[in-house]
Image (cartoon, grey):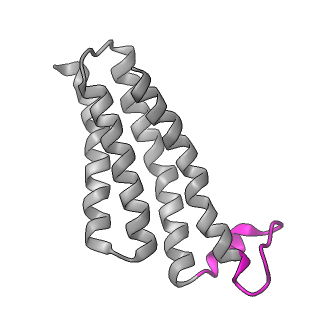
Amino acid sequence: MTVSIFCLILSALMILVTKAPVALAQSKEGRGYDNRNPRVQQSRLTGFGARALAAHQNMIEAFPVFAAGLLLALVAGVQGQWVATLSIVFVVARVVYSVCYWADIHMLRSLSWGVGFGASIGLMALPLF
């Protein structure tokens, strides 16, 4: 259980980690980082900045599905190594996903997205078995 809770915390922190390249791209956009209107500035990003923003937004979208799956498995009292394994798979898949998005490696990015989503759904399904 400790490994899976650590993965949950790490996944939440990954939301901040994936924001860092977005902020970097914004600061290099020409006018510096616009803290008054960051979303307007983000809408003008292209290339790496736009991909970094998409990776960040997708991490925000993926986190609740993973958290729901993990918490469901824990509340249901699922025993065994599957909870920890699927939690680790999710975290690794999300790291690979972000790196692939930043590097514009679209096929591996899509594959890693599917693996991460599958791990989240797997966590939700564990109480059924």
Residue 104 in the image, given as x and y percentages of width and height: 39, 77
Q: Which residue lies furthest to the front in this view?
A: 3
Magenta highlight on residue 39:
yes
Residue 74 in the image, given as x and y percentages of width and height: 38, 19
Q: Residue furthest right?
A: 36
Residue 80 in the image, given as x and y percentages of width and height: 24, 18
Residue 79 shown left or right of residue 92 in the figure: left
- As drawn, 29 above or below 91: below
54 or 104, which is in the foreground?
104
Residue 28 shown left or right of residue 129 in the figure: right
Q: Residue furthest left?
A: 129
Residue 53 shown left or right of residue 118 in the figure: right
**Total residue callouts:** 0
- Where, quadrant-wise, is the N terminus in this rendering? top left
Q: Give the residue at x 56% y 50%.
A: 15
62 or 7, which is in the foreground?
7
Which segment is the magenta one? 27-45
- As drawn, 77 above or below 93: above
Residue 110 shown left or right of residue 52 in the figure: left
Q: Which residue lies furthest to the bottom in this view?
A: 30
Magenta highlight on residue 91:
no
Q: Give the residue at x 40% y 28%.
A: 4
- Where, quadrant-wise, is the C terminus in this rendering? top left
Q: Give the residue at x 58% y 55%.
A: 17
Magenta: predominant secondary structure element? loop
Picture quadrant of residue 65: top left
Picture quadrant of residue 103: bottom left
- As drawn, 17 above or below 121: below
Residue 95 in the image, given as x and y percentages of width and height: 41, 55
Q: Give the residue at x 23% y 25%.
A: 126
